[in-house]
Image (cartoon, rainbow, N blue to C red):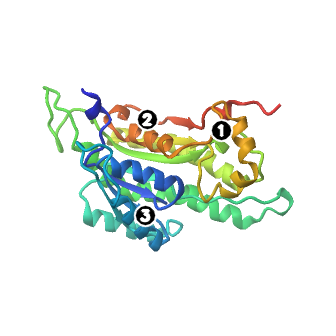
Amino acid sequence: MDIQSLFSVKDKVVLVTGGAKGVGRMISEAFVRNGARVYIASRDAAACDTACAELNALPPTTTSSPKGKAIALPADLSSLPACERLAADLAAREPRLHVLVNNSGATWGEAYDSYPDAAWDKLLTLNVQRVFALTRLLTPLLEAAGAASRSNPGGGEEGEGGGGVVLDPGRVIHIGSIDALRVPLLPTFAYSASKAALHHLSRHLAVELGPRGVTSNTLACGPFPSKMMAATLRNFGDEIKGANPLGRIGLPEDVGGACLFLASRAGAFVNGATVALDGGVSLMSKI
């Protein structure tokens, strides 16, 4: 298989939650520039519209590959009824979903002695519980994407409804954190715990959904330029860069490229993995 086909996401249908800003916006752009049809879900409808307008105005990655398209599909992912409406709306538009990127999330930093119970309610709901709910609701569309790539045991492609194995499964990509791999210095107790739960949920889903033609993997992201990280980078940016073996924070191409790999034929056999996308900083001792 040639490299263009191996890493292609052309014509794939992708849903990126929280895809209008920050890391989600970086991921959305990577898919749109490389020919995918990307639905952007966020509770901020205006931000979804703005992101889609900007992405649809961008040129394709190369002149020989047509650009994809961004489509706004606003939804408050902290609400179960909103997740249900989002899944139903997408199913009314698309017969299959090739890639679900569970990126929506929140953080909460506060001193241990005053850390509120409300932080746990908010973060465990959005960062874990709704991820499970939305993935479950969209599983039929993800299964349909995988079924379309079933191989014929006798050779060749047999397509949906046939036998053989799924060669290009539906993909679920969870955006986790290195704070789930090591204890952070900042007092973000509910955030690190929720991301650790998300990482293990991804592994559990990999076992459950693999036989159904869907993979589940996690990107444990280090610092990237985003609204969530803005204050931390403003106050500790130089220290964060200096502590990284590569001497920098993440760039849009880093997270976008990792998602393209996992979503392409090249990443079809990766299932249940947690990829540290952090330049190696999570490996550094604090002693």
Q: Give how far across and how far down residue 262 sits, in percent.
A: 40, 38
Query: Disc 1 or 2, which lies upstream in sequence?
Result: 1
Q: Nearer the viewer, mark 1 or mark 3?
A: 3
Q: Which residue is mark 2?
A: 271
Q: Which mark is residue 181?
A: 1
Please report whichever mark, 1 or 3, sits nearer to the chain's N-terminal start.
3
Q: CA distance from mark 2 to mark 3?
A: 30 Å
The numbered disc on residue 51 is 3
Badge 3 density bin: few <14, some 14–19, many ≥20, Cα 10 Å = many
Q: Position of residue 195 (x, y in %)?
A: 61, 49
Identify the mark nearer the N-term, 2 or 3: 3
Q: In x, y percent, where is residue 45?
A: 45, 73
Could you tell me which residue is drawn at 37 percent across and 31 percent down? 269
**Secondary-structure class at tag 3:** helix
Choose top left, top right, bottom left or bottom right for residue 74: bottom left
How far apart marks 1 and 3 lie (CA) works out to: 31 Å
Q: Residue at x 43, y 40 (%)?
A: 257
What is the secondary structure assignment of the residue under circle 2? Answer: loop
Q: Do callouts 2 and 3 mark residues in contact (Cβ within 8 Å)?
A: no
